[in-house]
Amino acid sequence: MPDYTSVTIKQGRGGWGGPLTVTPTDDKPLIYSVTGGGIHPVAARIAELTGGEAFDGFKSSAPFEKIAVAVIDCGGTARVGVYPMKKVLTVDVHATSPAGPLAQFITEELFVSGVKPEDVEPA
Amino acid sequence: MSESSASSNVVYESSVTAVGDQVGEFLSHGILIFFADESPQELHDMSVRHTATVSDAGPQTGDTIALGETQMEVLAVGSVVSDNLLQLGHLDLKANGLTEATLPGDVNVAEQLLPLPTPGDAFRIVRAGQPTPGGSP
């Protein structure tokens, strides 16, 4: 059984929201990357520091309740809202702010944006 | 299929495979969201899904987006649009008439009632005119 540790993820330049503290658990082990080109470096860094499991959401599907944090490369409309709406901690690598039809679900407690790998640090 | 004319170029050609239950709600905001057929399940409700047969380039200002019978001129394109379309089949189409992209994922077209696609509809991006440097002869 892996040991998990926590990370703090703060907003990057021009970003919004957070900081988020992410701690994977046996029930929620997945660092879920819903990004182009495979596992994003931000997701890889979170997985490396926490002991969570990096998971490519475009390659295979995961049960939603297994997700510790979702990493997205969203341009501001769709994915920024989908994961917070389901109360999943969400990290956008682009510097977006709450917008779009789902903006009401995007809160500082659930969402942080503009994040680069160096914005992820051991908590 | 009709032949492409000498002065225009299909840079993206796809076919709609499924239309999510929430797509109509997004349409009422003047927004259509596209994702590739193999996108994660949690995105299906809000998305028009499709499979591309040509995936050469993302849209540019001045291109025409054809969706079923509807043709729309592209007014503005955000900075992450091409990556999203070519890697994830993802595009956020907004009928807001704005000539600057407010969000990095926006593709803006004229204010209009966007069509509700049905499976089998074509989704196509056509580039007018000029030769593409390093492109096909």
Image (cartoon, coloured by chain):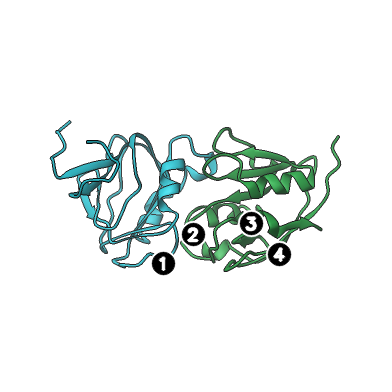
Chain colours: A green, B cyan
> Going 29% across and 34% down the picture, which residue do you hit?
B120
Residue A76's label in the rendered image is 2
Label 2: element kind:
loop
| Residue A116: mark | 3
Q: In the rendered structure, are the residues bearing label 4 and label 2 in contact, judged by CB atoms less than 8 Å apart? A: no
Q: Nearer the viewer, mark 3 or mark 1?
A: 3
Q: Which mark is residue A79?
A: none
In the figure, residue B6 lies in which quadrant?
top left
Q: Nearer the viewer, mark 3 or mark 4?
A: 3
Q: Disc 4 marks which amino acid? A: Pro
Q: Residue at x 59, y 52 (%)?
A: A83
Q: Foreground residue, A100 or B126?
A: B126
The amino acid marked with disc number 3 is Lys
Mark 4: few/some/many CA within 10 Å (<14, 14-19, 20+): some
What's the chain of the residue with tag 2? A
Residue at 47% over, 42% down:
B44
State which tag comes first along the sequence, 3 or 2: 2
Q: Amino acid at mark 1?
A: Thr
Q: Are marks 4 and 2 on the same chain?
A: yes
Secondary structure, mark 1, is: loop
Q: Amino acid at mark 2?
A: Gly
The residue nearer to you, when weighing B132 against B30, is B132
> Which residue is the site of mark 4?
A19
Residue B70 location in percent, x, y?
21, 49
Give me the disc on residue B102: 1
Mark 4 and mark 1, same subunit?
A: no
